[in-house]
Image (cartoon, rainbow, N blue to C red):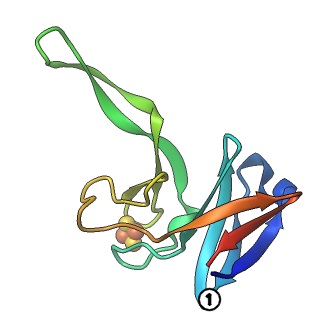
Amino acid sequence: MAEVRAGRVSDLADGQRILLDVDGREVFVFEREGRFYAFQNVCPHMGGPVGEGILMGKVEAVLGEHRETVRERFSKAEIHLVCPWHGWEFDIETGLCAAWPTKYGIRRYEAVQRGEDVYVVG
Ligand code: FES
C-alpha cells in the first residue's frame, strides 16, 4: 500500500483538518489527543462532507440503582464525528455509524506520523 503525505504535524494543531487525495478519493485527516485519524470525506447517508463535522462525546445515559436513566452526559471514551448535513454520527475509532453500526460507516484509513509529517496509508 502506498503512503500519501498529508502535511506537517503542526498543520493539524488546534483542531485543523487536512484534505487530500488518496487513490482518487477525498480523505480528511485530523489529530486528537496525540493520535491521527483519516477517513474518506463522504457520508453514507447523502454524500455530505463528513470531514467538516464537529467532534463530540457520545451521549450516554447515567443509570440509577434500578437501571433507570438518571441523566445523560457526553462520553469521554467514545468520540463521535457528526456529519454537518443531517447529524449522522460516526465513532472515530471504527468509522461505524453510531445508530446503525452493522449497516453504515465511513471508510477509515491508517494515519501515521513520520518525523514532523503525517502520512495516510492508501
Ligand atoms: S449526508 Fe451526512 S447525515 Fe446526511
Residue extending farthest to the bottom is 24
Q: Which residue is mark 1?
A: 23
Decide which of 81, 107 is in the foreground and name it.
107
Secondary structure type for disc 1: loop
How far across and how far down the image is residue 65, in percent?
A: 16, 8
Q: Residue at x 45, y 62 (%)?
A: 83
Q: Quadrant of the N terminus?
A: bottom right
Left or right: where 97 falls relative to 65? right
How far across and how far down the image is residue 61, in percent?
A: 27, 27
Residue extending farthest to the front is 1
Residue extending farthest to the top is 65
Q: Residue at x 28, y 58 (%)?
A: 101
Q: Residue at x 41, y 56 (%)?
A: 90
How far across and how far down the image is residue 104, in percent?
A: 30, 68
Q: Is mark 1 within 8 Å of ligand 1?
A: no
Left or right: where 107 falls relative to 17? left
How far across and how far down the image is residue 121, in percent?
A: 64, 73
Decide which of 75, 2 is in the foreground and name it.
2
- Amino acid at dot 1: Asp
Q: Residue at x 76, y 47 (%)?
A: 14
Above or below, comparing residue 33 to residue 7 in the picture: above
Categorize mark 1 by other alpha carbons within 10 Å: few (<14), some (14-19), many (20+). few
Residue extending farthest to the left is 66
Left or right: where 99 falls relative to 44? left
Q: Quadrant of the C terminus?
A: bottom right
Left or right: where 70 falls relative to 8? left
- Quadrant position of ligand 1: bottom left
- The tally of labels here is 1
